[in-house]
Image (cartoon, rainbow, N blue to C red):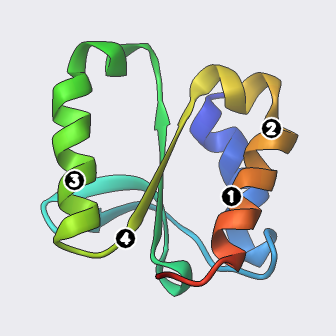
């Protein structure tokens, strides 16, 4: 099962702390892996190809944070597959914290 699909099983339908997430949503000029409008949180799952596009990802993160005011969290495929509980704990902590 792909990492995005595995994480989606835990995020969809308000399964994580009652927060609604959207999958593969356009935000401005980008399509993000997961987006929680209520928490203004973007979650990106990075596979092997992301090592080759680090500069693009960094620019994308800057734009989402500075222009849209979103928090961006990135997780590696490996973390989702092998430590999903820790990934979910980090996401749960983020959605429960108010934005500054």
Q: Which mark is residue 62?
A: 3
Q: Which mark is residue 65?
A: none
Q: Residue at x 75, y 77 (%)?
A: 14
Of pointers 2 and 4, the one earlier in the residue sequence: 4
Residue carrying label 4: 70
Residue carrying label 1: 91
Of pointers 1 and 3, the one earlier in the residue sequence: 3
User: Dot 3: within a 10 Å radius of its alpha carbon, few (fewer than 14), some, or many (20 or more) residues?
Assistant: some
Residue carrying label 2: 84
Q: Residue at x 81, y 30 (%)?
A: 83
Q: Nearer the viewer, mark 2 or mark 4?
A: 4
Of pointers 2 and 1, the one earlier in the residue sequence: 2
Of pointers 2 and 3, the one earlier in the residue sequence: 3
- 3D distance between C-alphas at marks 2 and 3: 26 Å
Q: Nearer the viewer, mark 2 or mark 1?
A: 1
SS label for mark 3? helix
Looking at the image, residue 28 sits to the left or right of residue 25; the answer is left
């Amino acid at each position: 099962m792909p990492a995005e699909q595995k994480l989606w099983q835990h995020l969809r339908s308000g399964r994580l702390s009652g927060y609604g997430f959207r999958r593969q949503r356009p935000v401005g000029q980008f399509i993000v892996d997961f987006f929680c409008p209520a928490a203004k949180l973007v979650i990106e799952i990075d596979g092997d190809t992301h090592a080759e596009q680090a500069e693009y990802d960094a620019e994308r993160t800057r734009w989402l944070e500075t222009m849209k005011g979103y928090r961006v969290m990135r997780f590696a495929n490996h973390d989702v597959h092998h430590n999903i509980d820790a990934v979910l704990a980090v996401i749960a902590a983020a959605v429960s914290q108010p934005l500054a």
